[in-house]
Image (spheres, coloured by chain):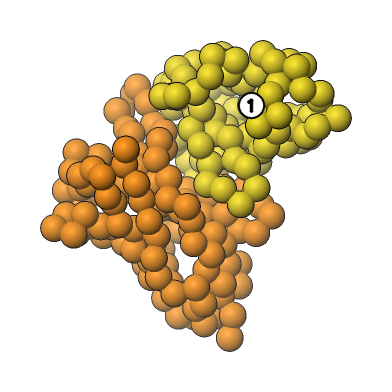
Amino acid sequence: QVQLQESGPGLVKPSETLSLTCTVSSGSISDYYWSWIRQPPGKGLEWIGYIYYTGSTNYSPSFKSRVTISVDTSKNQFSLKLSSVTAADTAVYYCARTNILTGYYFYFDYWGQGTLVTVSS
Amino acid sequence: EIVLTQSPGTLSLSPGERATLSCRASQIINSGYLAWYQQKSGQAPRLLIYGASSRATGIPDRFSGSGSGTDFTLSISRLEPEDFAVYYCQQYGSSRTFGQGTKVEIK
């Protein structure tokens, strides 16, 4: 079955850009949407945005001004960049396969294990 | 924007009991966009239900979802020890995609 693995720095300084990569294995990145979701310590889940394998994106309004999600189909990877981070961006970041059929369904069926990113100087 | 409110915040039950979790949307949503997840401590969420009532692959039939419009329910017919966890509902269409969660704890 599809496996996802997040990777990237666990510590980012305030005002800098958080960068994470999700590697998809045991399956192709093509024909699906792929999301980033985060969870601040002790809190609930927040959807950040998704990308289709073609490169089209949709971002949550809460993050739209400072997020970029990109895809590299040759490496079966997609990436997250979140700029101007503050301590409030400290969270476990998950990547997830996203099933979307407009008007019919939207859900996340495969998730990575998550990676904790701490924003601190 | 659409806000999902889950209740109760915590549900204290014994193994073998039935659990009923509520998810209420601030406005009518497409039931196809309503999903439920289970999250255990230190783990990623696991998809349980999508399209409000369709069980995901491998999910036991003691889990069921129902509802439409603004009111949705996740039911667990007989709680097993491994079912004690936090449950989230999720919709698509606004920045507040997930509800705040319901914790099902052992009584």
Colour in which chain A is drawn: orange
The residue carrying mark 1 is B23
Query: Quarter-wise, where is residue A81 in the image?
Result: bottom left
Give, as a three-letter code, the residue at label 1: Cys
Give how far across and how far down residue B8 sits, in percent. 76, 30
In front: A48, or B27?
A48
Above/below status of A18 relative to A13 = above
Q: Residue furthest right?
A: B107
- Farthest bottom residue? A121
Provide the chain ID for the residue under circle 1: B
* Residue B50, image quadrant: top left
Q: How many marks?
A: 1
Residue B22 in picture, x, y percent from top left: 67, 23
In percent of width and height, residue B33 lies at 44, 27
Label 1 SS: strand
In the picture, one chain is yellow; tell me its letter.
B
Considering depth in this image, is A5 or A88 the residue closer to the camera?
A5
Taking the image as drawn, is residue B68 in sight?
Answer: no
Q: Residue at the location (52% across, 46% down)? A: B44
Q: Would residue B48 be seen by someone viewing this image from the given angle?
A: yes
Residue A37, compared with residue B50, is above or below; it is below
Residue pictured at 34% horizontal, 58% vertical: A22
Q: Position of residue A17 (x, y in %)?
A: 42, 76
Q: Residues within 10 Å of mark 1 (few under 14, many from 20)?
A: many
Residue visible at 66% across and 52% down in the picture: A43
Q: Residue furthest front?
A: B81
